[in-house]
Amino acid sequence: MGTVGAVAVDSEGVVACATSTGGMLNKMEGRVGDTPCIGCGGYADNNSGAVSTTGHGEAIMKVVLARLILFYMEQGQSAEAASDSALVYMKSRVDGLGGVVTVDPQGNWAARFSSRQMAWAAAQKDTLHYGLYTGEHFTQSIDEPH
Ligand code: ASP
């Protein structure tokens, strides 16, 4: 169980996404969720950014969540605004909850979720950002001894 998702951008603005999941609790045998479906569990395009998603796969597939976020970014929204817009849309349109990590080719990133919690972390320059519950955003130096 549990989903692990990642997005990344290199110094040349090349983006990538990856998503792995155990699926949903009590899933039907043979169920294929959103995770392996392009545009749902993830999408990456150097022209707009990369997204990895988690949450209720049936809802995610109905709104094609990862691609929807990049569509909003193509229309001018930031990674954070686009992530929030798409999650609000998924809640109102199909009553689905989820979470996403998003990055644009300039390295602007977002970790946003409509579920109660989502463990997330981001490494940018020499700072580690992380959180679990809504509104949490901790930082520490990556070089800091533990
Ligand atoms: N999205 C996955 C699924 O529906 C579940 C998850 O995010 O863990 O299969």
Image: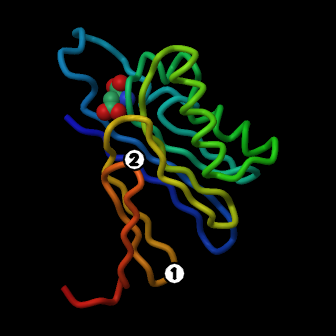
Which label was assigned to residue 96?
Answer: none
The image shows residue 71 at horizontal and vertical percentages of 73, 36
Amino acid type, residue under disc 1 in the picture: Lys
Give the farthest residue toward the right: 75
Residue type at mark 2? Gly
Quadrant (top left/top right/bottom left/bottom right) for the C terminus = bottom left
Instruction: From the viewer's side, name the closer residue of 129 and 103.
Output: 129
Label 2 belongs to which residue?
A: 5
Q: Position of residue 119 (x, y in %)?
A: 31, 52
Q: Element at badge 1?
A: loop
For this view, does 72 lie left or right of residue 29? Answer: right
Give residue 97's quadrant in the image: top left
- Residue on which disc 1 sits: 125
Question: What kind of colouring is applied to the model shown?
Answer: rainbow
Q: Secondary structure at mark 2?
A: strand
In the image: residue 107, left or right of residue 1: right
Instruction: Identify the residue shown where x is 40% and y is 64%.
Output: 137
Judge: label 1 CB < 8 Å from ligand 1.
no
Specify the quadrant that holds the N terminus: top left
Q: Residue at x 62, y 66 (%)?
A: 107
Q: Is residue 62 above or below residue 34?
A: above
Q: Is residue 86 above or below residue 73?
A: above
The residue lying toward the viewer, choosing from 52 and 110, is 110
Ligand 1, what quadrant?
Answer: top left
Q: CA distance from mark 2 to mark 1?
A: 20 Å
Front-most of residues 9 and 94? 94
Count residues near mark 1 (Cα–Cα under 10 Å), then give few for <14, some for 14-19, many for 20+: few
Q: Using a 10 Å C-alpha cutoff, classify the residue at mark 2 as few (fewer than 14 neighbours), some (14 to 19) or many (20 or more).
A: many
Residue at (46% x, 38% y) in the render: 53
- Where residue 131 sits in the image (x, y, percent)? 34, 59
Q: Measuring 63% from the left and 36% from the top, which residue is drawn there?
A: 85
